[in-house]
Image: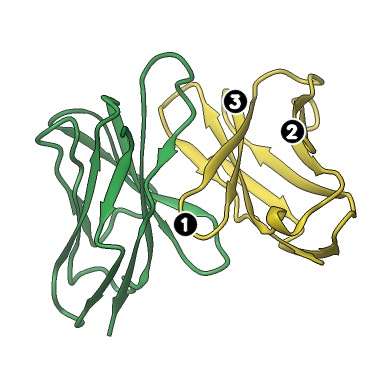
Amino acid sequence: EDKVVQSPLSLVVHEGDTVTLNCSYEVTNFRSLLWYKQEKKAPTFLFMLTSSGIEKKSGRLSSILDKKELFSILNITATQTGDSAVYLCAVNNNAGNMLTFGGGTRLMVKP
Amino acid sequence: DGGITQSPKYLFRKEGQNVTLSCEQNLNHDAMYWYRQDPGQGLRLIYYSQIVNDFQKGDIAEGYSVSREKKESFPLTVTSAQKNPTAFYLCASRPTSGREYEQYFGPGTRLTVT
């Protein structure tokens, strides 16, 4: 059974801080790892990672995958209050068309 | 506008009643998914469908049923057999080519059963 564990469960920081969110996984026939941001309702897609060591970047957010150690990190620099959300990590395997989600990290950025 | 719609946004039911949650997409996506999210938790897969007239159980299918009679529609019925139905329900879809593992989510339905 595929498994995804995210840490920390929750995090409170102040604007301007840098945060690192962690996602470790166990999956048979790994294909890709995805990060989503969930504010009030629907998760919105951030990144999809398939290759080790290649950083994906979008503005102040970046993510990298380590397929040897089976984890990914999501970095947010110069945090803003609008970054407050639940960040979800999910993995996909080659066998099917499903995503297995982690429990999420709830980030709160205080002014 | 293209997208996924779920209705209603909030739903209240008495225990023992079946309830059907709607999910419609006009993205021409083949695959559709239903997830359940409990407070402070991630998403757990209930059912998914890769093609019309076909669907598969996810990790927590007990007490739920689905149908996929049309490509654009994937309704979820929460039956009275579901022991703890109060939750936030998210529907998603994805194309089966291109960025195939990026799922697009609807706005969700919050179901409260008392």
Residue A35 lies, with reference to residue A67, above or below; the image says below
Q: Nearer the viewer, residue A3 or A58?
A: A58
Q: Mark 2 — on which chain does it sit?
A: A
Quick one: A33 or A106, which is closer to the camera?
A106
Colour yellow maps to chain: A
Question: Which residue is at 69% across, 55% downward?
Answer: A82
- Say if labels 3 and 1 share a chain: yes
Disc 1 to disc 2, how far (Cα)?
29 Å
Q: Residue furthest right?
A: A17
The span from disc 3 to disc 1 (Cα, nearest Å) is: 24 Å
Which of pointers 3 and 1 lies earlier in the amino acid sequence? 3
Q: CA distance from mark 2 to mark 3?
A: 11 Å
Q: Nearer the viewer, mark 3 or mark 1?
A: 1
Name the residue that disc number 3 marks: A32
State the residue position of label 1: A41
At label 1, the amino acid type is Lys
Residue type indicated by callout 2: Leu
Drawing shade for chain B: green
| Residue A62 position by quadrant | top right
Count of numbered circles on the image: 3
Residue B112: image location, x then y, percent? 31, 76
Task: Say if mark 2 contacts mark 3, CB within 8 Å.
Answer: no
Q: Earlier in the sequence, mark 2 or mark 3?
A: 3
Would you name the residue on which mark 2 appears? Answer: A70
Task: For mark 1, give the secondary structure.
Answer: loop
Compared to residue A14, the image places residue B94 above or below, namely above
x 51%, y 41%: residue: A100
Query: What residue is at 82 percent from the left and 21 percent from the top?
Result: A53
Picture quarter with the C terminus of chain A: bottom right
Q: Residue at x 16, y 66 (%)?
A: B19
